[in-house]
Amino acid sequence: MHEPQSKFMNLAIEAAKKNFQKSAGGPFGACIIRNNEVISVAANSVLISDATAHAEMNAIREASKKLQTHILSDCIIYSTTEPCPMCFSAIHWAQIPLLVFGSRIEDAAAVGFNELSISNQQVKTLGNSTVEIIAGFQSEECLSVLRDWHVEKADLLY
């Protein structure tokens, strides 16, 4: 099992924080690595792109393009917040074997985001997914990004 590393989650957190200035989307970031090398780092861009432009989706698209394959079975994804069911499904379909996330779906809902109250563990169980999940990694740092957004950008909720 992969031992989560702060340097990769910190890249996702930084992407989420930078997104504040752009007002491109919510305070969510993702980082995909392979063999301890960064493949992609992305933020949420739903406000300038489309409803599916979540950080995880953007990171998967970027990694797939860079690696020239839709199969990311030798990669790991870090996400500042527990992925929504759409993003977890994309992680599953990209065959990413490990997901590391910080804050939970409930935390995003608590600051006003329109989240489905379906955890990744529920999606994994119901869908018989083999994606391994490490929850709560650097959760306080990830929660602070959500809280900062709530104070500074709450008018941009979607």
Image: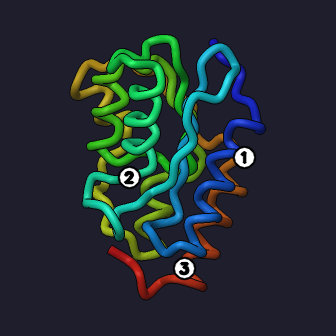
Q: Secondary structure at mark 1?
A: helix
Question: Which mark is on residue 10?
Answer: 1
Of mark 3 and mark 1, the one earlier in the sequence is 1
The Cα–Cα distance between marks 3 and 2, rounded to whole angstroms, is: 18 Å
Q: Position of residue 57 (x, y in %)?
A: 37, 42
On screen, 30 above or below 14? above
Q: Residue at x 34, y 22 (%)?
A: 94
Which residue is under mark 2?
54
Q: Secondary structure at mark 2?
A: loop
Q: Is residue 97 left or right of residue 32?
A: left
Q: Position of residue 36 (x, y in %)?
A: 70, 20
Neighbourhood count class around disc 3 (C-alpha, 10 Å): few under 14, some 14–19, many 20 upward: many
- Mark 1: which amino acid? Asn
Of 28 and 45, nearer the camera is 45
On screen, 155 above or below 114? below
The Cα–Cα distance between marks 1 and 2, rounded to whole angstroms, is: 18 Å
- Mark 3: which amino acid? His
- Mark 2: which amino acid? His
Q: Is residue 89 left or right of residue 78?
A: left
Of 58 and 125, nearer the camera is 58
Question: Which mark is on residue 150?
Answer: 3
Q: Is residue 11 left or right of residue 82?
A: right
The Cα–Cα distance between marks 3 and 1, rounded to whole angstroms, is: 20 Å
